[in-house]
Image (cartoon, rainbow, N blue to C red):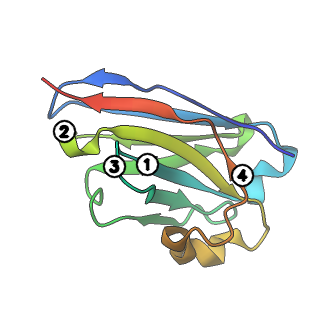
Amino acid sequence: QADLVESGGGLVQPGGSLTLACVASERAFGSYGMGWFRQAPEKEREFVAAIGGSNFRTYYADSVKGRFTISRDNAKSTIYLQMNSLKPEDTAVYYCASDPDNYASSRLEAWPGFKYIELWGQGTLVTVSA
């Protein structure tokens, strides 16, 4: 079973930027779908972004499209979430997640429904506040 470990959370002012990272311990990481969810206080967990393993195809929630960028470095078994133009409503615990399947790149659109997500990180807190 792979482990997912997030880092990079913290306090940032509105309009600022922050980059999250998630390192996977699984050797087959390169073919897996990887991505991010978030959970704000007293709200349900929601999808943020996902990236395919083989073709690096990306998929975003409408709320972050144009502001957040997901990327991956398979050599380092790491994915990133570059967050720009942050808003107070982006405040949440951000969770790294994985669809550990070689066909994951073809089903990123299932991520908002949590389908195929089998691995979760512990989360990292992002607070956007003045």
Q: Nearer the viewer, residue 128 or 103?
A: 128
Q: Nearer the viewer, residue 74 or 123?
A: 123
Please tell me which of labels 2 and 1 falls first in the chain. 1
What residue is at 36 percent from the left and 31 percent from the top?
Answer: 126
For residue 68, the mark is 3
Q: Which three-letter amino acid code belongs to the residue tagged 1?
A: Arg
Q: Is there any visible trace of residue 107 in the rendered image? A: yes
Badge 1 marks a residue whose secondary structure is: strand
Q: Which three-letter amino acid code belongs to the residue tagged 2?
A: Pro
What residue is at 71 percent from the left and 39 percent from the top?
Answer: 77
Q: Nearer the viewer, residue 84 or 92?
A: 92
Q: Position of residue 116 (x, y in %)?
A: 69, 70
In what quadrant of the picture does the C terminus appear? Answer: top left
Residue that carries the numbered disc 4 in the rendered image: 119
Q: Are marks 2 and 1 in contact (CB under 8 Å)?
A: no
CA gap between label 2 and label 4 equals 28 Å
CA gap between label 1 and label 4 equals 14 Å
CA gap between label 2 and label 1 equals 14 Å
Residue 55 vertical placement versus 82 (above, below): below
What residue is at 51 percent from the left and 40 percent from the top?
Answer: 80
Q: Position of residue 1 (x, y in %)?
A: 87, 46
Q: Position of residue 91 (x, y in %)?
A: 29, 38
Q: Which three-letter amino acid code belongs to the residue tagged 3?
A: Phe
